[in-house]
Amino acid sequence: MSRDLENNVSAVQSLAPAARTAAADGVGVDLANYNSAMVIIEAGTATGTTPSFEFEVQESDLSGSGYTAVATADLDGAEPTVTTANDEAVYEIGYRGIKRYLRVINKTPGGTATPTLPCSALVLRGSPRVAPK
């Protein structure tokens, strides 16, 4: 068994880094052959007048469709709504669900004067069923 983390965790981008001014759906991440997952959302500085950016973790049995919000009971941690009061932060959300695909979406931003948030989201897949030796 390898003790280094690199051989036991796989980071996959769901929501590409960008300055978000509109809603965006992340790419689905395949959790096949992994027994655990965690979402990491990185938020930069929110700008605009009263900006508000709501994130949601979604799951599906299919890679390209059928995504629905993950039930609160299947999350360890809260999905953030980022404002100027809690921006410039990293949010970690554990996933306990059983679906094969996971993604992160950024819902339509609230606020005026072009609310903008530089952000990204990763899905960390852990506990591989077959780990390198």
Image: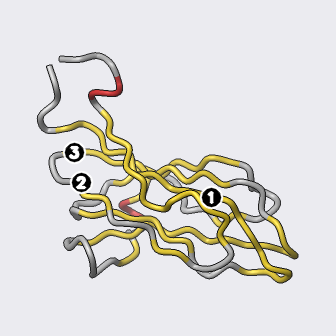
Residue wearing tag 2: 31
Name the element at disc 1.
strand
Instruction: Give the x, y percent position of residue 130.
Output: 12, 34
Precedes in sequence: disc 1 or disc 2: 2
Amino acid, disc 1: Cys
Q: For residue 48, which quarter of the picture? A: bottom right
**In this view, 76 is above or below 24:** above
Q: From mark 1 to mark 2, how far is it between C-alphas? A: 23 Å
Which dot marks residue 55? Answer: none
Residue, disc 3: 35
Residue at 73 percent of width and 50 percent of height: 88
Task: Provide the residue designation for mark 1.
Answer: 119
Mark 2 residue type: Leu
Q: In front of the other: label 3 or label 1? A: 1
Instruction: Name the residue: 82% across, 66% down.
Output: 47
Q: Identity of the amino acid at label 3?
A: Asn
Q: What secondary structure is marked by label 2?
A: loop
Q: Look at discs 1 and 2 and give the one toward the viewer.
A: 1
Residue depicted at 27% across the width and 76% down the height: 64
- Whole-number angstrom distance, CA of label 3 to CA of label 1: 27 Å
Q: Which of pointers 2 and 3 indicates the residue nearer the eye? A: 2
